Amino acid sequence: MKRVGLLGGSFNPAHAGHRHISVEAMRLLGLDEIWWLVSPQNPLKSAAGMASLDARLASARAAARHPRVRPMAIEARLGTRYAVDTVTALRRRHPEIAFIWLMGADILPELHRWHRWRAFVRSLPIAVLTRPRYMGAALVSPAMAWARRWRHPAGHAHDWTRWTLPAIIVLDIRPTALSATAIRAADPDWADRLDDGQTRTGHRF
């Protein structure tokens, strides 16, 4: 069975840090591919300052630079807004693929605010990728307090396709100082150079 990691996000813009954690996750989890799911609009983020989907998808394609990292705008094509619905649709369309969700430690403290978050955690394994400055808040977050009973040791990362759901693992990823916030601050006009108004999903069902 093909093993695919799903890395969802705004990618506003995508950068080498996304590629770094993706390559590390592929190695630690034994993944065949990672799909970058470029979100049309994160429901928990303001649209103010958010570049167009075209520009963000273009930045993801430029940053990926790996044959097994595949940026795509699947949610725009599916018409899904929430991760739980996106995962349900992907599993229905691709029963031949085993999916695992990849999540930065900075996201875990807000997971309990996601739409039907417990259903989401029950729907596929989750790998939390460490970010040192966020780990304290991540490990005591409401979602982790609920899910910690199903946490697997990092040394068993390659076994994730055999786990019973729910299942969560925390992976130690070498840190990088890159951030989308810093890139936007240094180059406020980055999206203007990429926005061509022609979004493509990057994937056929």
Image: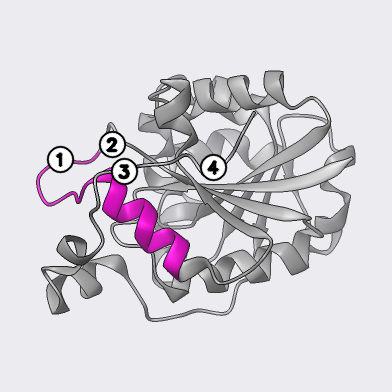
Query: Looking at numbered disc 4 in the image, what kind of residue is underneath it?
Result: Met
Give the labeled residue for mark 4: 144
Q: Secondary structure at mark 3?
A: loop
Label 3 – label 2 distance at C-alpha: 17 Å
Magenta includes 140? no
Query: Element under label 4?
Result: helix
Distance from the alpha carbon under mark 2 to that under mark 4 = 25 Å
Q: Is residue 134 above or below residue 48?
A: below
Question: Distance from label 3 to label 4 (Cα)?
Answer: 39 Å
Contact, CB < 8 Å: mark 4 with mark 1? no
Q: Nearer the N terminus, badge 1 or badge 2?
A: 2
Q: Which residues are magenta?
A: 45-62
Q: Position of residue 187 (x, y in %)?
A: 15, 75
Which colour scheme appears in the figure?
A: one colour
Tag 4 or tag 2, which sits nearer the N-term?
2
In which quadrant of the rendered view does residue 21 lie?
bottom right
The residue sitting at 22% across, 41% down in the picture is 45
Q: Nearer the viewer, mark 3 or mark 4?
A: 3
Give the numbered dot on residue 47: 1
